[in-house]
Image (tube, rainbow, N blue to C red):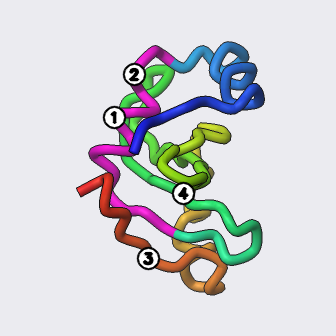
């Protein structure tokens, strides 16, 4: 598996001031990976220091053949992860390439 970037990801990365390598760190060292049953995408979540605060960051990605396509990366609002798990929108997922 190898990582590629969507145009949307690259645009948002620049707009949000996301440092190089942060998305890959979140993917490979995530506190949890989830499948978003509403969108069909996957989400890796990790607590990191971003813009001077410790916060959960959500990396949305898709799997296409042997590629991991990074879609977007953004900070989660307080309680957002818990709400998505409780509602069943996100379900736990264990990707082979993140282990």
User: Which portion, as a residue range, is magenta?
Assistant: 19-34
Mark 3 = which residue? 92
Q: CA distance from mark 2 to mark 4?
A: 17 Å
Mark 4 = which residue? 43
Marks 3 and 1 in Cβ contact (< 8 Å): no
x%, y% of residue 33?
Answer: 42, 63
Is disc 3 placed on a helix, strand or loop? strand
Is disc 4 placed on a helix, strand or loop? strand
Residue located at (46% from left, 27% from top): 50
Question: In terms of sequence position, does the residue under pointer 3 or pointer 4 come before the other?
Answer: 4
Q: CA distance from mark 3 to mark 2?
A: 24 Å
Q: CA distance from mark 3 to mark 4?
A: 10 Å
Q: Residues within 10 Å of mark 1 (few under 14, many from 20)?
A: few
Considering only vertical position in the picture, is 72 above or below 38?
Answer: above
Mark 2 = which residue? 21
Mark 1 = which residue? 25
Give residue 16's quadrant in the image.
Answer: top right
Is disc 2 placed on a helix, strand or loop? loop
Give residue 75's quadrant in the image.
Answer: top right
């Amino acid at each position: 598996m190898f990582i590629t970037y969507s145009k949307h990801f690259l645009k948002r990365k620049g707009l949000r001031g996301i440092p190089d390598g942060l998305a890959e760190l979140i993917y490979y060292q995530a506190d949890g990976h989830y499948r978003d049953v509403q969108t069909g995408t996957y989400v890796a979540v990790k607590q990191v220091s971003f813009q001077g605060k410790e916060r959960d960051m959500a990396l949305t990605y898709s799997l296409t053949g042997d590629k991991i396509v990074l879609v977007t990366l953004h900070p989660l609002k307080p309680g957002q992860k818990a709400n998505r798990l409780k509602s069943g929108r996100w379900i736990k997922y264990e990707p082979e390439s993140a282990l």
